Image (cartoon, coloured by chain):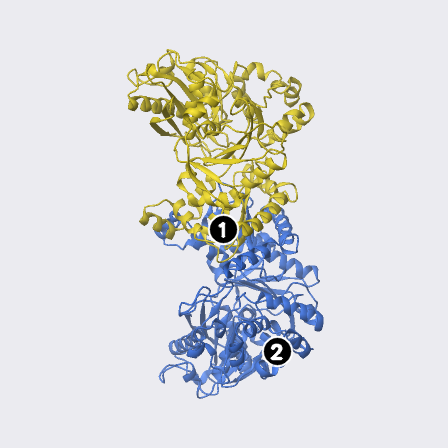
Chain colours: A yellow, B blue
Amino acid sequence: MSKKYTVGIDFGTLSARAVLADIETGEVLTDAVFEYPHGVMDTALPSGLPLPADFALQHPADYLEAFGKTVSEVIGKSGVPTCDIIGIGIDFTTCTLIPVKADGTPLCFDKRWENDPHAYAKLWKHHAAQPEADRLNEAAAKFAPQILERLGGKTSSEWLFPKVMEVLEKAPEVYENTAYFIEAGDFIAWMLTGRQTRSYVFASYKSLYLHDFGYPPKEMLKYLDPRLENVLEEKLSAPMVYTGEAAGYVDSLARERFGLSADAPWFNVGTVVACPEPDAHCAAPALGMSRSGDMFSIFGTSSNYMLISDEYKIIPGICGVVKDGLIPGFNAYEAGLCCFGDHFAWAAKNICTAEYREEAKARGISDVQLLSEKASALAPGESGVIALNWWNGNRNILVDSSLSGMFLGMTLRTRPEEMFRALLEANAFGTRVIIENFEKHGVTVERMTAAGGITRKSPFVMQTLADILGKTLCVSGYLHSSALGSAIYASVAAGGHPDVTTAVSAMADPCNTVYTPNPETKEVYDLLYKEYLTLHDYFGRGGNDIMKRLKKISSDVKRGTK
Amino acid sequence: MSKKYTVGIDFGTLSARAVLADIETGEVLTDAVFEYPHGVMDTALPSGLPLPADFALQHPADYLEAFGKTVSEVIGKSGVPTCDIIGIGIDFTTCTLIPVKADGTPLCFDKRWENDPHAYAKLWKHHAAQPEADRLNEAAAKFAPQILERLGGKTSSEWLFPKVMEVLEKAPEVYENTAYFIEAGDFIAWMLTGRQTRSYVFASYKSLYLHDFGYPPKEMLKYLDPRLENVLEEKLSAPMVYTGEAAGYVDSLARERFGLSADAPWFNVGTVVACPEPDAHCAAPALGMSRSGDMFSIFGTSSNYMLISDEYKIIPGICGVVKDGLIPGFNAYEAGLCCFGDHFAWAAKNICTAEYREEAKARGISDVQLLSEKASALAPGESGVIALNWWNGNRNILVDSSLSGMFLGMTLRTRPEEMFRALLEANAFGTRVIIENFEKHGVTVERMTAAGGITRKSPFVMQTLADILGKTLCVSGYLHSSALGSAIYASVAAGGHPDVTTAVSAMADPCNTVYTPNPETKEVYDLLYKEYLTLHDYFGRGGNDIMKRLKKISSDVKRGTK
């Protein structure tokens, strides 16, 4: 029998990457990366139309182009006969939500809607629907408290319903003309198979779907807005698929939907399309997650902490717990920081001086690398600067996107690298808050594995995390963990392996580098962490709601009502 | 009778400037500026020896050179016969303290001491003596509560006694070999006259001297350290001189003490040297202060708020109240922000990006100007960022140099100009706190006049101050107000006018530009000010002493004890 292969494609915030993997060994034969031409649209639409505060949109045309180009490239370069490519796995940022027509065409492709921000894909980190999230929380507490209980105590403005409600309220015409609101990952599967499905995992984590209760009750939706009473049947309904299952099969029109020429390398009609998965989840199989207490993290623009456990507990302030959500047979917990590497990118853009830029250029390194290197020369606690890492709000465990960041301890001697280090340490303190919250509620973290761009680029960041968490961190050396994970899920959906655990044993990537906590820094970091916690609770739990008030003032001023 | 003239020389933090003025009209014939070659030494001594945290030293050789050069220049350029120059006025930063030998030679001129930081001039903003200030506060509360009552409730680490105590404790050999600790302003007078005196104004504001009690009692000094019991007689004693009086007369050796060649333009032997004054005070006569309720401010690296009033009140948290301290016949109140323009300089150094630097260069403006211009394009409250302006601690009304600064409201969209604007607004909020504190205690501010570099360079800063204070600000167009004020005081000391009020009427510079509060911004600024006050009290009055703890951790780490 010939060797069999699957393709995994991982859609991140700024780019997509595909791999073609051997299902016996996990060996990746080829990979390809494509950056979205429109990137993240947070200040203006392609036409130049300015966007309101807290918007983060994407252009779905970028997704189609990214899929077509990277897949053609990995298949073409590999020389593997397409009949031996048995499955396709897709993972995507979530909740990234596209309003589409009945045939799946995104509304923004239509001239009529191209100047309406609400017709575009709302990226996971679109935060303009906070008022809707607040109302949703209130309604859930009244009609379906079990939702809040399972999903960390609060729903987030990043999730599906607030985004749908925002369209209904701010752009009712767009709402009316939207046949379906669909997760971008499900959208890609639809474009491949010609058949709409809904991933159980997206629905469970971002659409308030509970395995034992289903979606929110009708009366709750009606209470939010009478026009929402039948939104489930009208705009969200489609057969549900589960991890390790097939969403469908590549159909004969798929190539055309992705705008590929007839001679571009492509899948055979009939190739299995696996149930789409959240992007961060897909590193789980790639990093060998298979025991209760295994946690893995992806460190990129944001960071995710995924934990599998035999225990099923209700834990406040996390993104949620989902039965069979990650590796079938385990309960999967998720939490995350909605801003991790984005803090460093902010620093490079805003506090990297002309002298530093020049030095980085002369040495052929990036601004972030230079700031990071200078920061690494400091001792913990030396700068006297501490930060709250909430530049993009707080996802866990406060679940409040209207929080904002702070630097404290500034003096006339404070240098950019000290602010940079404070941001890094605050990222790690925020991670520690999440882990301690799991453990306080009876779900222990036994092993930590990490992947994502930052794990390879910055040993300093990884060591600081290990030091502040007081835990050993295993880092995968492999560049495209999520894409490999998608290929692993695809191997199960396509029948190449009997179940996910078996596929993981065969295909997972081994741990490459181990970061061990340095006991010498523990005492100082414990002191700083205590300070962090005090600020975290004071500004994050109602001691002083100044951050919300400042955002309100800012948005009133921008709207001209102040 | 020929026209008569006086020379005023103003010693600032980074440079000195001299003017030669007509005593009938106040017209300034010539001026000259000299930057201190050693500037502020806050990281290393001239030998390269690194300095501990919170040090700010100067080299007294710079003062002598600055005096000699600027005075020669103003006299030389003016063509005025030296017999018509009847007086010299000196103003200086304070408390800037020099340890000197019995003949007035600074200890650091001696090879033996040139590598000891404690042998140099400790600049007003030297903050390493905070532990000593804390002990002094405790001792004063026990032995001489009237001191605390008069001088704002707390003594500052910037003042004379903490600086003396620091030398005694950290460098006892320097202490033993110091014949006198002398204010730099009194030092210059001594170098001119050959006779040591002490300015009543320096002593009143910075050495805990009260007009009705004198210096701190012996038992209090002994309690602090037995070796300090006789420090007044041993190292601080000299005849006291008052505003408008002569400290002495230029003697035949003065030219030599300033290192001037025989042909450099110079004063006649016998020219009157006026009582030295604090630098900020000297703008008072130059700006025409003469009525109860007149306040003037100098906006430079730091800012001072000087108020004259018929009322004598005890006001907590200010620098102090001194009878006849500014304009004889009034009670003079002083308060200030120990970091004003320094915040902007910090921003230019640390958060001006390469792109901004390039733009500033291309347009031929400074980094501060560019940041300020971009900040001025924002609406109040638009950025959502607020700051605590404590980069250099808080002088008033919290009197605590161990406080530090903060930015709050940071997001991924926050730009350097938003941080810059937050610093500016926080400077203005800090000013409002001071003014409201005066008014709450029964001393009203009727008129505000401003001078200093920033008043001319930045109409935006002045307008923001007027808006946030809700008060009209008169700004003098004249560049060297303090130097002119010194020339005015000198005209009285030399008998050219019968008293300061008369001299002010003749010589003061008229108000040049008026900034009127914009009522449209009031509502937003009042909201932001309320937020500022909450943070001010929480971090400044014991709600959360994190700033002190972070400084402690930092200094422990640097000392290697953590």
Q: With A253 as the anchor, is A380 left or right in this view?
A: right
* Whether labels 1 and 2 share one chain: yes
Label pair 1/2, CB-CB below 8 angstroms: no
Relative depth, front residue between B422 and B288:
B422
* Total marks in image: 2
Question: In the rendered structure, which amino acid carries the disc numbered 1?
Answer: Phe
Kindly identify which residue carries mark 1. B420
Quadrant of residue B495 in the image?
bottom right
From this view, report whether residue B202 is shown above or below residue A256.
below
From this view, report whether residue A554 is shown above or below residue A318.
below
Task: Measure how far apart labels 1 and 2 are at the Cα level.
Answer: 45 Å
Kindly identify which residue carries mark 2. B228
First in sequence: mark 1 vs mark 2: 2
Q: Secondary structure at mark 2?
A: helix
From this view, report whether residue A375 is shown above or below residue B204.
above
Quadrant containing the N terminus of chain A in the rendered view: top left
Q: Secondary structure at mark 1?
A: helix
Relative depth, front residue between A8 and B118:
A8
Question: In the rendered structure, which amino acid carries the disc numbered 2?
Answer: Leu
Q: Give residue B513's position: percent from left, percent from top.
A: 52, 59
